[in-house]
Image: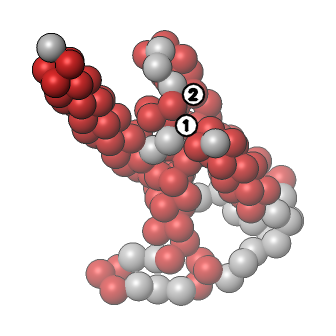
Amino acid sequence: ILALLWLLLVAALTLLLFMPFALGHDQIHLPFGLELDELLHVAFFAAISWVPPLVVRSRSVLGLVILCLVLLGVFSEIFQLGIPHRRFSEVDLAANMLGCAAGTMAGLVLRRLVFKRMLRRNKQSRDEAG
């Protein structure tokens, strides 16, 4: 079910990235010189990047999935050159990559924690049975 929710989130994000209108969030300035637009790019790409490490077992398949997410971040910015009221932004591109990296790292940490917990439970079960 987590994989299905992830696919829905990726689809929703992809639709938002290619909408032919600006949402106005790039006009909102945050403290410390941050822009809401870049923060949203990091958050969206982190949100779609933390799940694959939890559900994909194969390292090569996981690498391919992460590569596809990175390419989504790159091409979403390139395609905005041809979308009315949208613009290409190197800062948004960097925010997309940062989100992918942060989400993937979070997913890998969670995977390791979950795996360790499963090993501990299996060991306890064997000890109690033996």
* Quarter of image, res 13: bottom right
98 vs 13, left or right, is left
Residue beneath the point at 48% across and 61% down:
43
The residue under label 1 is which amino acid type?
Val
The residue under label 2 is which amino acid type?
Val
What is the x, y in percent for residue 3? 62, 38
Residue beneath the point at 45% across and 44% down:
50
Residue 116 sits above or below residue 91 on the image? above
Which dot marks residue 24?
none
Per the image, label 1 sits on a secondary structure element best described as helix
Q: CA distance from mark 2 to mark 1?
A: 9 Å
Residue 20 sits above or below residue 34 on the image? above
What is the x, y in percent for residue 6? 63, 45
Q: Farthest front residue?
A: 129
For disc 1, the marked residue is 70
Q: Mark 2 or mark 1, which is nearer to you?
A: 2
Q: Quadrant of the C terminus?
A: top left
Per the image, label 2 sits on a secondary structure element best described as helix
Residue beneath the point at 46% across and 86% down:
29
For disc 2, the marked residue is 65
User: Which sits earlier in the primary sequence, circle 2 or circle 1?
Assistant: 2
State whether residue 101 appears in this view: no
Is 52 or 34 nearer to us in this picture?
52
Residue 78 sits above or below residue 56 on the image? below
Q: Residues within 10 Å of mark 2 (few under 14, many from 20)?
A: some
* Quarter of image, res 41: bottom right
What is the x, y in percent for residue 12? 74, 56
92 vs 17, left or right, is left
Residue 96 sits above or below residue 70 on the image? below
Q: Quadrant of the N terminus?
A: top right
Is 58 or 102 nearer to us in this picture?
58
